């Protein structure tokens, strides 16, 4: 008998089944990947296992954990099962952790409420677990609050809370979706190392993670299990078209070809741009971006990559005039543009557009799609009458793959991919010359992400659109970018053509980023952790090269002297040892 047995599970709301007739098992110590697109029923299944579905859910079938029936069980039975027998790592630790209670107290309460420890013994077990999950200075983190930790550190705390009672089963629901590639590799390595004999049910839409970390794989579609088996077998010979489509949609950093470089005069020239912010105590300056140079040509995509806090979004927002520059100059279409966005010429504001990461946060929930997409026309094409404006909106929706049936929908009535298409339509309806995409596909499923990338490429080919593509997903970056800019603590560390960047990186940081990318192939190497720790605070940057505390190639000069960008074998790179390291990479 399996540790977890699910038999004929169905979950419905208002007469509509979200999960239908689901049956599978998880054995003790086994690692199983549960994959599928958004809305396929993955998270609903996890909540059902934990007994956390809302009262409005109609649940039928059977779920047993260690022989104990969960469906229909009372609160006392469920509370006894949670923590001791099943732990949960949620996707967003910011919402899962209590912001008002110190981290140590939150873990301590798990032990005390379940009668597993008390007093000083509970404190010692919490400190030991915080140390095991790799939190630096566990005694200090014991007293810290969630908002005082980085995203990676908060996810480590979530793993500690899920495993502190040594459960039989650990459920991890998209545990690395919003994390940088290096932090993702650390979290996945941590899950492998620390779970001991605990079984793992890993819920994700990222097949590369399943390929490297799960023995078995389950594929859901529209709430139904359509395929299951050994991970290697399903990747090599999927039995269904849907599984094959999921695998094919997963981008690969190891084999994909980057677009060929684009020639021509610069459309946008970013010269020596720096951005600083004043600390609240006005005693210190936070230097978010320092001395960045960048040229963007018509029809070109430049990706800006780096870990969270590296200055990617700050650089883009300074170019758009949304935040002020401390120093530097921006030239667009041969003319210098200065000042905040509201003081710039209306033509410049029209020609520089932005697509945000989260369409749910950038689309007005009280406006219908027609009004959302038409809104820029009120400023940039005020002479259009109502009929002409509507016709232009319909034409724009068709360009992004949506019909006029979407005109009267509200944002909450759209899927994630549909909402992002609406956001892109809103940006493109004024025919801009430059589009800034700030993590625009980060939260999308593989197939939806692929459709959005194809849409952007098609628009670029037809109109000559230039794109600044901000992302932490290097597999996606390789597929779409002509050139790549790598930044670290606000400084350029490498700038090169896409193909050269991915086949011959010149900076140790770039090499570390590429090593950490998982590959959607159980037989291919990938997701290797070659850099430890997290990026230091931008308020207290290290001396010399900011990367030297994490760099295995650092020597005395790296600690003492800031490397200036220079050209090495066609690549702009800021590394004292770039020539010496050519052959090692």
Image (tube, rainbow, N blue to C red):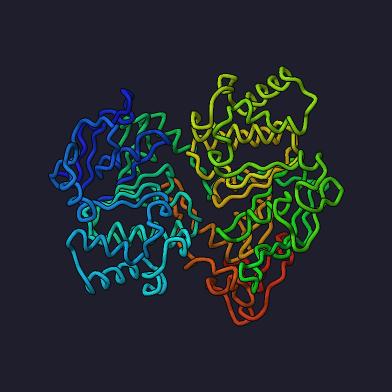
**In the picture provided, is 283 more to the left or to the right than 307?**
right
Residue 529 versus residue 435 in the image, above or below: below
Residue 358 versus residue 114 in the image, above or below: above
- At horizontal 63% and vertical 27% (from top left) the residue drawn is 371
Q: Check the image and name the residue furthest to the right.
A: 334
- Is residue 229 in sight in this rendering? no
The foreground one among 408 and 162 is: 408
The foreground one among 453 and 78 is: 78
- Quadrant location of residue 393? top right
Residue 90 versus residue 413 in the image, above or below: below
Q: Position of residue 378 (x, y in %)?
A: 73, 30
The foreground one among 144 and 458 is: 144
**In the picture provided, is 121 more to the left or to the right than 136?**
left
- At horizontal 62% and vertical 50% (from top left) the residue drawn is 470
Q: Position of residue 395 (x, y in %)?
A: 67, 22
Q: Check the image and name the residue furthest to the top.
A: 387
- At horizontal 20% and vertical 31% (from top left) the residue drawn is 61
**In the picture provided, is 271 more to the left or to the right than 128?**
right
**In the picture provided, is 195 more to the left or to the right than 253?**
left
- Quadrant location of residue 23? top left
The foreground one among 56 and 433 is: 56
Position of the N terminus, as image quadrant, is top left
- Is residue 517 in sight in this rendering? yes
């Amino acid at each position: 008998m399996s540790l977890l047995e699910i038999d004929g599970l169905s979950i419905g709301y208002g007469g509509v089944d979200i999960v239908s007739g689901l049956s599978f098992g998880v054995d003790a110590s086994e690692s199983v990947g549960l994959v599928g697109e958004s809305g396929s029923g993955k998270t609903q299944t996890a909540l059902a296992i934990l007994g956390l579905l809302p009262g409005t859910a109609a649940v039928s079938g059977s779920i047993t954990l260690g022989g104990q029936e969960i469906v229909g069980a009372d609160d006392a039975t469920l509370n006894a099962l949670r923590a001791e027998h099943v732990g949960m790592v949620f996707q967003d630790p910011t919402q899962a952790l209590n912001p008002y209670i110190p981290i140590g107290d939150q873990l301590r309460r798990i032990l005390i409420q379940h009668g597993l420890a008390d007093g000083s013994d509970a404190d010692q077990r919490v400190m030991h677990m915080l140390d095991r999950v790799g939190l630096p200075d566990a005694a200090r983190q014991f007293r810290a609050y969630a908002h005082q930790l980085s995203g990676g550190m908060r996810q480590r705390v979530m793993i500690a809370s899920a495993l502190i009672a040594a459960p039989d089963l650990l459920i991890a629901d998209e545990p690395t979706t919003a994390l940088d590639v290096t932090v993702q590799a650390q979290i996945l390595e941590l899950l492998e190392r620390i779970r001991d004999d605990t079984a793992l049910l890993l819920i994700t839409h990222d097949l590369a993670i399943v390929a490297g970390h799960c023995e078995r794989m389950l594929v859901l579609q529209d709430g139904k299990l359509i395929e299951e088996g050994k991970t290697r077998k399903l990747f090599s010979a999927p039995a269904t078209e849907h599984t094959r489509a999921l695998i094919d949609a997963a981008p690969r950093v190891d084999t994909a070809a980057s677009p060929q470089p684009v020639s021509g005069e610069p459309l946008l020239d970013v010269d020596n741009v720096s951005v600083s912010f004043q600390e609240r105590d006005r005693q210190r300056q936070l230097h978010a971006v320092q001395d960045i140079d960048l040229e963007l040509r018509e029809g070109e995509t430049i990706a800006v990559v780096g870990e969270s806090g590296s200055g990617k979004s700050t650089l883009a927002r300074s170019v758009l005039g949304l935040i002020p520059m401390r120093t530097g100059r921006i030239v667009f279409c041969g003319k210098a543009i200065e000042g905040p966005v509201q003081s710039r010429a209306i033509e410049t504001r029209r020609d520089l557009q932005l697509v945000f990461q989260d369409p749910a946060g950038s689309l007005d929930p009280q406006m219908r799609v027609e009004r959302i997409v038409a809104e820029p026309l009120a400023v940039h094409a005020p002479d259009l009458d109502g009929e002409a404006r509507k016709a232009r909106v319909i034409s724009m929706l068709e360009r992004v793959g949506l019909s006029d049936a979407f005109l009267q929908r509200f944002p909450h009535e759209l899927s994630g991919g549909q909402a992002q298409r609406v956001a892109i339509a809103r940006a493109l309806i004024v025919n801009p010359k430059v589009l800034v995409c700030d993590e625009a596909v980060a939260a999308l499923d593989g197939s939806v992400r692929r459709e959005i990338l194809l849409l952007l490429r098609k628009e670029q080919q037809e109109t000559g659109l230039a794109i600044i593509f901000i992302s932490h997903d290097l597999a996606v970056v390789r597929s779409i970018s002509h050139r790549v800019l790598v930044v670290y603590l606000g400084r350029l560390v490498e700038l090169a053509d896409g193909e050269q960047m991915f086949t011959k990186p010149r900076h140790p940081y770039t090499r570390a980023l590429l090593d950490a990318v998982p590959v959607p192939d159980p037989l291919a190497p990938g997701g290797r952790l070659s850099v430890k720790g997290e990026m230091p605070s931008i308020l207290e940057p290290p001396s010399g090269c900011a990367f030297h505390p994490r760099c295995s190639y650092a020597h005395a000069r790296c600690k003492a002297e800031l490397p200036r960008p220079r050209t090495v074998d066609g690549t702009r790179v800021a590394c004292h040892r770039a020539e010496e390291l050519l052959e090692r990479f």
